[in-house]
Amino acid sequence: MSLIDTTALSAALTMLLDWHVLLYIILGLAFGIMLGATPGISGTLGIGLMLPLTYHLETIHAIMFLSAIFTGSLYGGGVTAIMLNIPGTPAAVATTLDGYAMTKQGKQNEALGIGLGSSVLGCLMGYIVIFFLLLPLGQIVLSFGPPEMLMLTLFSLTVIGTIQGDLMRSLLVGFFGLLLGTIGATAFARPRGTFGLMELYEGIPLVPVLIGLLAVSELFFIIERSYIAHDMTTVQKDLRAILRGMAVPLKHKFNLLRSAVIGMVIGLLPAAGATIASLVSYGQAHAASKDPETFGKGNPAGIVAAETANNASESGGMATMMTFGIPGGSATAVLMAAFMLHGLSPGPYLVRDHMDLTYAVIIGNWLQGLLLLGMGLAFIWYFSKIIFVPTRLLVPVVALLAMLGSLAMRGLMIDATLTLLFGIIGFIMRKLDYPTIALLLGLILGKMVDGEFARVHIMFSGRYEQLVTRPIFLGLLVVTIAMFFIPFIRRLQDKKNNSLKASQ
Amino acid sequence: MARLVGNLLFLSALSVFAAIYRHDVQRLPRPQERIVVEFLFVIIMVLVALEAIRTLFQLISKHYPKEKTSDPPVTPEPQWYHWFLGKQFMLMLTSSLFLFLVPLLGFFLVSFLFLVLLNWYLGSRKVLEYVVFPVGFLCFIYGFFVLFLQVKLPKGILF
């Protein structure tokens, strides 16, 4: 049986040979990049906001416009992560680790170029695989139940072990983050750890914590300097550095390929999404690296891994949504609503009855990846100039944007208060050499661990032995245990090597 | 020394929060609602104990060094209260005031005052920098967030 339906494919190409499609993609990408780069404002909000406006558009125009917002926002989140240590979305948290470190070294143009190149390649590679293997890959979704999702989340937790610094301190704040992640309603809808604050019923909101721990805590250090970069004489000023950076992912072929596969496969799984994809990918790049000690200090491989995976995850999410009608995250849920608004119901019937449109969406997204290259380049060329803004102007604006980003999310003052509170906590942690990123990762994953654990407990209570009969669960369990011990073994080896060198 | 004492205080704060949270979940009726918190509490307390022991050892070894060495002359550390006169404290203070005043005076007025005062404190002396720039920036926020994205920002007694 052929994997490609050629009749549907030619109909899809005819659909896309319309200049309106190009126009809507360009508009969607521009809007998405802007939203993604704005802290607290997600692509989901943009898609939701534009949804009613697309009602009178042709189906393909509407879907292309809205999915371009999704693509643009995923990329835009990485730009502020690199320039200001503010991940526009949680999916860009892993990008801050090496991206912002490069900016502080004055290599912001190269870092932005690496981010753009990796995002585009991740998007293109993901959609190529989905184009050929849409249906077989979709089956993966069906083999992932709560036990496998629990193990996948625990697996992504192993990235904490890769964070630079003292391992015991990383673990301590990582577990504390997990504890904070359990705050909120339990699986039985009772409030837990909210201490009477109903605003915390849905848990500690992620965006204020993310902005506080990374951006606001950084402001306390930037404010002591005149510019973001430590040495302004070495700051990259030319476009060539961006172009050079865009070619860097091609030098990390294996890392690029692995990250794209990780991103796409994790993107296929409902509720896992871009954040888990980028964290797992970053952890794997660190584990496979010959110089893991440079990760977190401005290693380009870290940006390649994080940005490729989070953009490749979009293709997986779209595939699951179109083949099974299961939205992987909030953005795909709103996109699904867009399909329905135009009389199409995502799921097996969409693939059976409208294969031409399914192909058009996949090829159109591929086109978005190509256009992102040009549009992203123009955007980062201007955005990179932020490094030349003196901190006396930058700090008040970023502080205000941080508060605004938190307020914009739910319109609650507690979110802005949490931003400042976590900013101060992050500042204290950094003064005492505790990695703030470990606390953040714990918090992000704590919510998921808690939810999946409750589901597993309800499903398998009293018969946990059945879990080991599930091959994917078992495989992930073994790999997770191995990944937890790799950092310990590596650090012991390093100590041994250092003491040997010292004795010689 | 101050760093090590700070670390002990930080560890105490973590363990106190974890203990209060663990105590709070005891009122939940189902074990599956408590088990994750209890499990994490145990791990955190073990790690806190290990880190505290390590810090205490470092404190003791600093206090009672094994061998007296001729240390190079040390430049005196700034007194702790100097921090309250610095930029970091000022950022903390103005941000806290911002949060306190926004519900009373509204987002835009307080933001304007925040930008002007902080810009001026950090060294901006040109009107273009500490007045015109904040006004332009707030106009952009109003246009993009309030008019276009229809984000509801807190309104106070004035605006």
Image (cartoon, coloured by chain):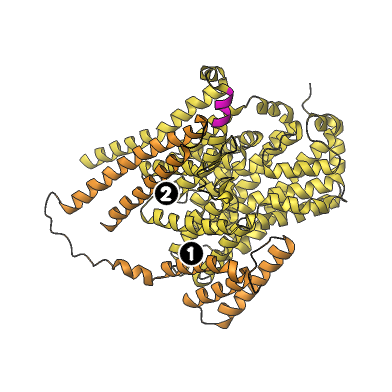
Residue at 34% x, 37% y is B46
Tell me the magenta residue range: A453-459
Q: Is residue A176 above or below residue B119?
A: above
Chain bearing tag 1 is: A
Local crowd at mark 1 within 10 Å, few (<14), some, or many (≥20)? many
Label at residue A120: none
Q: Position of residue B120 (x, y in %)?
A: 50, 78
User: Label 1 is placed on what type of residue?
Assistant: Ile
Q: Which chain is yellow?
A: A
Chain bearing tag 2 is: A
Q: Position of residue A76 (x, y in %)?
A: 63, 54
**Mark 1 → mark 2, Cα distance in angstroms:** 20 Å
Q: Position of residue A156 (x, y in %)?
A: 52, 36
Q: Nearer the viewer, residue A411 or A227?
A: A411
Q: How many marks?
A: 2
Reading the image, the residue beneath label 2 is A435
Q: Which chain is orange?
A: B
Looking at the rendered structure, the secondary structure element under dot 2 is loop
Reading the image, the residue beneath label 1 is A228
Q: Is residue B158 above or below residue A403?
A: below
